[in-house]
Amino acid sequence: MDLEHALRIFKLYCYIYRRSAAEAESILWSEREREAIRQLKRLVRESADLFREEDSALTAKAA
């Protein structure tokens, strides 16, 4: 699966997940899609603190 397709699926998954986690899981038809979502979720979790710290530093600098 190419990155563009994986990101499209991930965006749709996140959009639907806000309403229903079970419904979001139902849109993943193939094991490749499920694996891509797992990897993207892991990447977001691992990177979230990094960008949060960057945003805090920029806010502090502006003040």
Image (cartoon, rainbow, N blue to C red):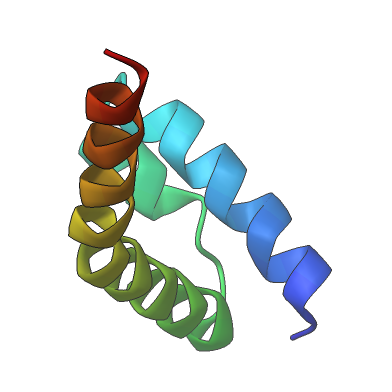
Would you place residue 25 above or below residue 32 in this image? above
In the rendered view, does 46 fall on the left or right side of 12? left
Would you place residue 56 above or below residue 24 in this image? above
Query: Residue 45 location in percent, x, y?
Result: 22, 63
Would you place residue 43 above or below residue 41 in this image? below
* Residue at figure coordinates x 56%, y 87% from the top left: 32
Q: In which quarter of the image is residue 35?
A: bottom left
In the rendered view, does 58 fall on the left or right side of 7? left
The quadrant the C terminus occupies is: top left
Would you place residue 32 above or below residue 59 in this image? below
| Along the viewing direction, whichever of 19 and 3 lies nearer the viewer | 3
Question: Farthest residue toward the top?
Answer: 63
* Residue at figure coordinates x 50%, y 78% from the top left: 36
The quadrant the N terminus occupies is: bottom right
Query: Residue 20 location in percent, x, y?
Result: 26, 27
Query: Residue 5 location in percent, x, y?
Result: 78, 66
* Residue at figure coordinates x 33%, y 51% from the top left: 51
| Along the viewing direction, whichever of 44 and 51 lies nearer the viewer | 51
Give the number of callouts.
0
In the rendered view, does 54 fall on the left or right side of 14? left
Q: In which quarter of the image is residue 21?
A: top left
* Residue at figure coordinates x 26%, y 61% from the top left: 50
